[in-house]
Image (cartoon, grey):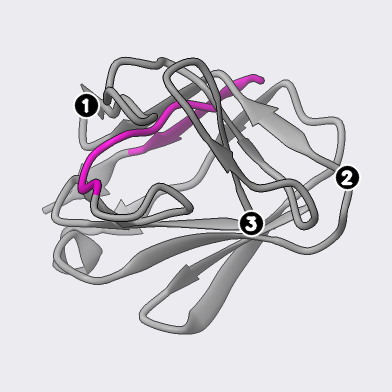
């Protein structure tokens, strides 16, 4: 399972074995910190993460359409990203297991986070 928090406040839990997940935030939340956090050691492959209509890419080269959120496996290479959490703010990745990289991302299933005005 993955927790989705906005500025440290838990907004929803993304269930195990999901194939598609959508959660709508208000437009005021767009500039806030969105944290996707693993709650276990069972990895979840994210095949697509779309924030406000923009697909985010991840990895060392910022060219991957997927990544893993996994509590006990961390990797940042040219081909893989596995991280216990990932933080998005203003439509950009600001933190993950890849040090120094600002942008990468994508969920196995698709998570869409539309913002409403």
Which element carries disc 2, helix, strand or loop? loop
Please give the residue where the numbered disc 2 appears in the rendered image.
42
In percent of width and height, residue 43 lies at 79, 39
- 114 is higher (above) or lower (below) than 4: above
Q: Is residue 29 magenta?
A: no
On residue 91, the disc is: none
Q: Tell me where residue 47 sits by quadrant.
A: top right
Please give the residue where the numbered disc 3 appears in the rendered image.
84
**Closer to the camera: disc 1 or disc 3?**
3
Q: Tell me where residue 112 sits by quadrant.
A: top left
Q: Main secondary structure of the magenta part?
A: loop
**Which residue is painted at 27% across and 25% down in the image?**
62
Residue range in magenta is 101-113
Q: Left of 93 or right of it: where is 17?
A: right
**Closer to the camera: disc 1 or disc 2?**
2
Please give the residue where the numbered disc 1 appears in the rendered image.
53
- In front here: 24 or 5? 5
In percent of width and height, residue 79 lies at 50, 15
- In front here: 19 or 62? 62
Which element carries disc 1, helix, strand or loop? loop
Distance from disc 1 to disc 3, alpha carbons, whole Å, reads 24 Å
Distance from disc 2 to disc 3, alpha carbons, whole Å, reads 10 Å
Distance from disc 1 to disc 2, alpha carbons, whole Å, reads 28 Å
Q: Left of 44 or right of it: where is 31?
A: left
In percent of width and height, residue 25 lies at 34, 57
In percent of width and height, residue 81 lies at 53, 33
């Amino acid at each position: 399972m993955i927790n989705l928090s906005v500025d440290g406040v838990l907004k929803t839990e993304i269930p195990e074995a999901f194939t598609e997940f959508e959660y709508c935030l208000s437009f005021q939340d767009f500039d806030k910190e969105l944290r996707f956090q693993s709650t276990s050691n069972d990895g979840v492959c994210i095949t697509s993460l779309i924030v406000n209509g923009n697909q985010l890419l991840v990895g060392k080269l910022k060219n991957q359409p997927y990544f893993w959120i996994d509590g006990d496996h961390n990797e940042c290479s040219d081909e893989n990203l596995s991280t216990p959490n990932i933080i998005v703010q203003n439509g950009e990745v600001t933190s993950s297991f890849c040090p120094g990289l600002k942008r990468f991302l994508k969920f196995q299933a698709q998570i869409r986070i539309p913002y409403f005005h």
